[in-house]
Image (cartoon, rainbow, N blue to C red):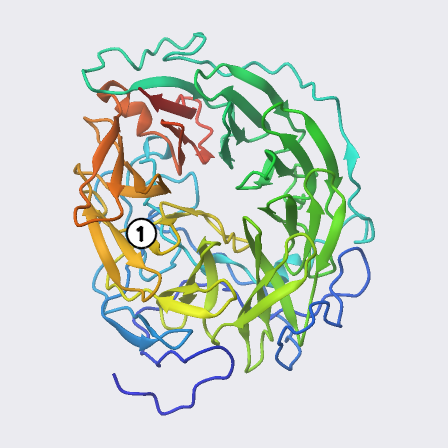
Amino acid sequence: MTQPPNQPPQGGFGAPQDQPPQHQPPQGGGFGAPQPPPAQGGFGAPQSTPNTPGAPGAPGVPATPPPPAAPPQPQPGYGYPQQPGPYGAPGPYGYPQQQPGPYGAAPQPGYGYAQQPPYPGAPGTAPGAPLGGKSASKAKPALMIGAAVAALLVIGGTVYAVTGGDDGGKKKPVAQQSGDGKHSGSPSPTTSGGGSGGDDPENLNEGRQAGEAKVLWYKPAPDAPGSGADAPGMWITGKTAVKAAYKQVFAYGAADGETAWGPIDFPQKICASTSRQSADGKIVVAYKNGSNDRAKCNQLQQIDLETGEKGWSGQVADGGLFDSALNVELTVSDRTLMVGRSQSGTAYDIDTGKKLYDKRKYGAACFPTAYAGGTGRLIQVASCAAGTDNEHDEIQEFDPVTGKLRWTQPVKKGWRVARTYSVDPLVVYLTNQDKKAWNISTFTKDGKFRSEVKVNEKFAPQCGWAILERDLQGCQGVAVDANTLYLPTGALSSANEIVAISLADGKEKWRAKSPADEPMAPIKVEGGKLIAYVQPSYDAGGQVVSIPITGSSHKSTRLLQHPQSAAGIEDTFYDGAVDWVDGRFYISAGRLSGRDDAKEKLMMAFGN
């Protein structure tokens, strides 16, 4: 491909080639929208002096933001992004990256399948909307029906201009003991199919065929408003399976579905949660401080997954005028909880609630915007020099306990870090809104660029919606080990493949085809094998399979064949979260429709 006549922008490695736009992007801001500097003062307010020595920045002052753009119009539903064609143009780190080929008319959606967005990262229908004529309550478990959506839905900092806190941003979060571990007496969800029984007459194991696994238990969803409600998180320990939904957190025996503790009730809806549990089995959920549209997601509650004990609680203060806690991101690294606001972050000891440190503006207008955590690692993404010629993202790693900077890696102008597929090793998904292009890059332990994916394929892991934050760790249906990245291809309604990609050079190592006429996606690498989930069909239950990751044969072996008698229920988990623990498969809803006639299920477990 010919080189563009203009000089590459400064910052980061390499420069993407100029390409004529194939489609107009949807209206609305993306990451990097110009943001004014936040006001001084208040707990967590960004400072004008850097607090992260050695972090490079670019000169320039963020420009005043434009008026808020109209939100993106909903598309026909979650769908696979139309992924790129031939690769070859340099990506954000100077190596070949995927570029979109010419786009024709989008395919018409079939029954139960969503139409494809016009380019990578384009938004689909908001959660809870019907999928291609199929109601949300009847949607696929959706391990792959959401693309690795990028930062294109995020509205710029202007959204925070009218959301100043009642405390003026001066009140610190206060960690305090809240309660004695006792909870309200809300009725426990019905258990069936091997649990304690109840008033739900369904017997999902009736008619189970030889060789089919059992439905160990299942739970109906709690009442939700007609507009729907979020059901974030799913945490499986050795003893308990814990799930948040609307205004409650439920806990069941992992093996039998008996009520383990709770439920814990909250006065307002749960709006965020830690996707990971801490090293000693703690999570934190955030809930709203009111019920109106301006209510902030700033109330924190720590919970012990094993016992259900409510530990410390606190309130997240606003960091400044353009650094609101309207929405927060909760990230766990070992025993450190990072609470991310729109332009800063505050770290706490997750066991005690003690504040450890702040992450604020550094360099020349670099504002922290998102976090990702793993064992011993805390990754931060910052937006730098917004509105200037040197606007770019930066990736940093900190010591999660002390906050000490370990390394900084700038990203080429025009590219935005949208997701992390893995923290250790670090694998990031980037998008370029102007080029309608995507890129997957990997890094060494010390933050050096390692490789870019060079596979000409359409990939489709399931990623949540990042409306007012980046949600770096909001993807599943992707797995990574020390040397290999495993991604599902984007088949809409038939057998797809999982592609194993070398982290050393970004090239394909092998691929394995789904054993059924339904898509499959990775769950995790365990015992030297890749564990994957095959979605159910209308006449067959789902499957859990293992795929050898070494040797010459990568044919899948079935671990569980879910019963056909439960396929209709298994097929209803909307935007579902899945996990494989101790030989049992768990699936839960990520969103509740709130329809009274839907008879929605909250969670389900299969095993032998």
Tell how many labels. 1
Q: Of helix, strand and loop, which one carries label 1?
A: strand
Quarter location, residue 522: top left
Quarter location, residue 137: top left
Using the image, determine if residue 52 lies above or below residue 108: below
Residue furthest bottom as drawn: 5
Identified at 28% across, 59% down, the residue is 82
Quadrant including the N terminus: bottom left
Residue furthest front as drawn: 551
| Mark 1 neighbour class, 10 Å CA radius: few under 14, some 14 to 19, many 20 or more | many
In the image: residue 34, left or right of residue 126:
right
**Residue 400 in the image, given as x and y percentages of width and height:** 64, 53
Using the image, determine if residue 11 lies above or below residue 229: below
Identified at 28% across, 67% down, the residue is 454
- Residue 489: in sight, yes or no? no
> Mark 1 is on which residue type?
Leu
Q: Nearer the viewer, residue 445 or 487?
A: 445
In the image: residue 361, left or right of residue 495:
right
**Residue 168 in the image, given as x and y percentages of width and height:** 81, 53
**Residue 135 in the image, given as x and y percentages of width and height:** 34, 34
**Residue 289 in the image, given as x and y percentages of width and height:** 70, 39
Quadrant including the C terminus: top left
- Residue 214: in sight, yes or no? yes
Q: Which residue is mark 1?
A: 487
Identified at 43% across, 27% down, the residue is 595
